[in-house]
């Protein structure tokens, strides 16, 4: 008889896989130093550390102090959340984030421009952002798949971002609805599979409404199916979330 995917033992196993894959995120307008310090404290748990903390760029110095002595990277967002088509502004904002000490940058793809047929600005924007990130700062490109809607547009955005030098492609900002979906993830993972066949290594990040271990498990299972059981590591698979860590810790028998 097949095992119950929602049994405590299975959820615990999935939670153990997920913990080091979480980008623990707080992108609220009202975030202050205390909120960022609290977030960074949560990033280091008795069961291990999360993959990264993701915050607005002005809070990077606070996070660096709070995470001193740990190996938890600091991620931030640029061109966020609107995904404007202003290449120079996105480049400058990304460069400023890198100068502040960001280890990872999640830049929003100019999805509205793609919707109206412009396939050039997205490529140029991603290339510009990657150029200022250089080889040592990870660039994740947020496609905002819920606004792109169709598989054709999601695939086009994925291919353009990968061609521009994205290290990861990411579903959503979490600021529009719908956020992440398995349908969009399938399209993105298919694009990643093609890139891997061309020896271009790109990761995947689900973000936007993934709050429970059961929900995140579906994205892990999909990645396993499309790219193999060995694909999902912090270098290749992330889940961006604020609430998911609480459910992971509950499944692990720890206080959230």
Image (cartoon, grey):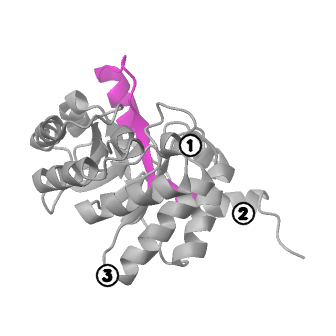
- Sequence-first disc among 3 and 2: 2
- The kind of secondary structure element at disc 3 is loop
Q: Residue at x 31, y 45 (%)?
A: 106
Which residue carries the number 3 mark? 199
Mark found first going from the N terminus, 1 or 2: 2
Q: CA distance from mark 3 to mark 2?
A: 34 Å
Tell me if residue 24 is in the magenta stretch. Answer: yes
Q: Where is residue 13 drawn, in percent x and y?
A: 64, 64
- Mark in front: 3 vs 1: 3
Q: Which residue is mark 2?
A: 10
* Image side of residue 122 versus residue 5, left or right: left
Q: Residues within 10 Å of mark 1 (few under 14, many from 20)?
A: many
Decide if residue 234 is in sight here: no
Disc 3 to disc 1: CB gap under 8 Å: no
Residue 231 sits above or below residue 140 on the image: below
Mark 3 or 2, which is nearer the eye? 3
Q: Image quadrant of residue 61?
A: top left
Front residue of 54/133: it is 133
Mark 1 → mark 2, Cα distance in angstroms = 16 Å
Q: Residue at x 37, y 75 (%)?
A: 195
Which span is picked out in magenta? 15-42
Image point (46%, 53%), residue name: 153
- Residue depicted at 20% across the width and 36% down the height: 86
Residue 31 in view of the camera: yes
Q: CA distance from mark 3 to mark 1?
A: 32 Å
Label 2 Cα neighbours within 10 Å, binned few <14 / some 14-19 / many ≥20: some
Please identify the quarter of the rendering in which residue 151 is found.
Answer: bottom right
Q: At which x and y percent is residue 45?
A: 46, 47
Q: What residue sits right under mark 1 in the picture?
A: 244
- Mark 3 and mark 1 lie on one chain; the one further toward the N terminus is 3
């Amino acid at each position: 008889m097949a095992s119950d995917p929602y049994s405590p033992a299975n959820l615990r196993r999935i939670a153990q896989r997920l913990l080091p894959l979480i980008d623990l995120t707080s992108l609220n307008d009202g975030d202050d130093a205390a909120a960022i310090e609290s977030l960074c404290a949560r990033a280091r748990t008795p069961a291990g550390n999360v993959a990264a903390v993701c915050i607005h760029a002005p809070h990077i110095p606070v996070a660096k102090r709070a995470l001193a002595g740990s190996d938890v990277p600091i991620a931030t967002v640029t061109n966020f959340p609107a995904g404007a088509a202003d290449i120079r502004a996105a480049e400058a904002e990304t460069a400023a984030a890198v100068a502040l000490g960001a280890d990872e940058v999640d830049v929003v793809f100019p999805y509205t421009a793609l919707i109206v047929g412009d396939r050039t600005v997205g490529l140029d924007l991603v290339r510009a952002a990657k150029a200022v990130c250089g080889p040592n700062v990870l660039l994740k490109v947020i496609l905002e798949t819920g606004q792109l809607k169709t598989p054709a547009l999601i695939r086009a955005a994925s291919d353009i971002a990968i061609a521009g030098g994205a290290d990861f492609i990411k579903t959503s900002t979490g600021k529009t609805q719908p956020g992440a979906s398995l349908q969009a993830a399938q399209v993105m993972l298919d694009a990643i599979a093609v890139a891997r066949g061309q020896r271009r290594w790109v990761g995947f990040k689900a973000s936007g409404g993934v709050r429970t271990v059961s929900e995140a498990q579906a994205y892990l299972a999909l990645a396993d199916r499309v790219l193999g059981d060995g694909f999902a590591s912090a270098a290749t698979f992330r889940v961006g979330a604020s609430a998911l860590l609480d459910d992971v810790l509950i499944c692990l028998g720890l206080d959230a």
